[in-house]
Image (tube, rainbow, N blue to C red):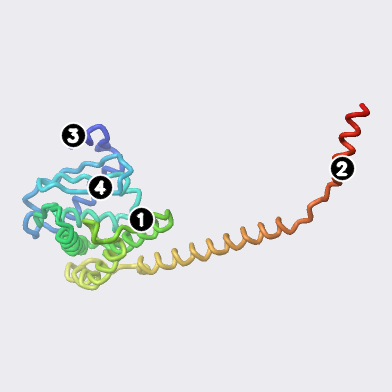
Amino acid sequence: MEEFKNDMLPERDPRYLTVKEVVYHLTQCNQDVPGISEINWVIHVVDSPDVNAFVLPNGQVFVFTGLLNSVTDTHQLSFLLGHEIAHAVLGHAYMFDRPYSRTLEAEADKIGLQLAAKACVDVRASSVFWQQMEFSESLHGYPKLPEWLSTHPSHGNRAEHLDRLIPQALKLREVCNCPPLSGPDPRLLFKLTVKRFLEDSEKEDLNTTVRKQKTAALPIQKQEQIPLTYIVEKKTTS
């Protein structure tokens, strides 16, 4: 916490209040989960471009503004914070053994999705966040790190894993008497948005190519070349 003390947002900042509301809602809706009611959850929002969040075992919640800028809505944020709360409740230690760490991440995704479902969050938004991250990195040309070199699952694998868990989480929402989800599936909306973006990009590339071809085809006015001997004679005469 000491390293972030100069970058903490004040408690009156709207971004701090948003995080506080999400954490409060998650914890209040999961009081029956062992560990959650015993922990005093304290919010810290760090003004940093890092797309990151973590929760210490003592309930200190750290969320970076880079993460807040990367989520589309509070549904995505609720799942991500549910994931971090799950780490604390499950007593996960961040180990250097990479495969085991990925197993812990998958477990936290599963429990975090359940916490979000009990809070009546649209759990379908969980996989969309990781699809957004994967698409954003591909647009910026970031190289994909082999999953065996990472402590976390790849964005694509994480989204697929969550998609397999979502049907069960939706059933849990029903058991908790959550209101029915309205509107289209955010996963479908994201696919359509990406499709439209790629189509528009292809059209723009095609238009750029056509403009270049037309420019290259324009007639270039031929300038009459003055013989070098004429220039020499002109200088000598003068």
Q: Position of residue 160 (x, y in %)?
A: 28, 68
- Tell me which amino acid carries mark 2: Pro
Q: Earlier in the sequence, mark 3 or mark 1?
A: 3
Q: Is residue 84 left or right of residue 33?
A: right
Please say if 157 is above or below 15: below
Q: Which residue is mark 4?
A: 19
The image quarter containing residue 211 is bottom right
Q: Earlier in the sequence, mark 4 or mark 1?
A: 4
- Tell me which amino acid carries mark 3: Glu
Q: Is residue 140 left or right of residue 199?
A: left
Q: Nearer the viewer, mark 2 or mark 3?
A: 2
Q: Which residue is mark 2?
A: 227
- Tell me which amino acid carries mark 4: Val
Distance between the Cα atoms at labels 4 and 1?
A: 14 Å
Q: Nearer the viewer, mark 3 or mark 4?
A: 3
Distance between the Cα atoms at labels 3 and 1?
A: 30 Å
Q: Residue furthest top?
A: 238
Q: Earlier in the sequence, mark 3 or mark 4?
A: 3
Residue at the image position 30 percent from the left and 39 percent from the top: 47
Quarter placement of the C terminus: top right
Secondary structure type for disc 3: helix
Q: Is residue 143 left or right of residue 235?
A: left
- Tell me which amino acid carries mark 1: Thr
Q: Nearer the viewer, residue 85 or 52?
A: 52
Instruction: Bin the neighbour count of mark 2 within 10 Å (Cα to Cα): few under 14, some 14-19, many 20 and up.
Output: few
Distance between the Cα atoms at labels 2 and 3?
A: 78 Å
Q: Which residue is mark 1?
A: 72
Q: Earlier in the sequence, mark 1 or mark 2?
A: 1
Q: Nearer the viewer, mark 3 or mark 1?
A: 3
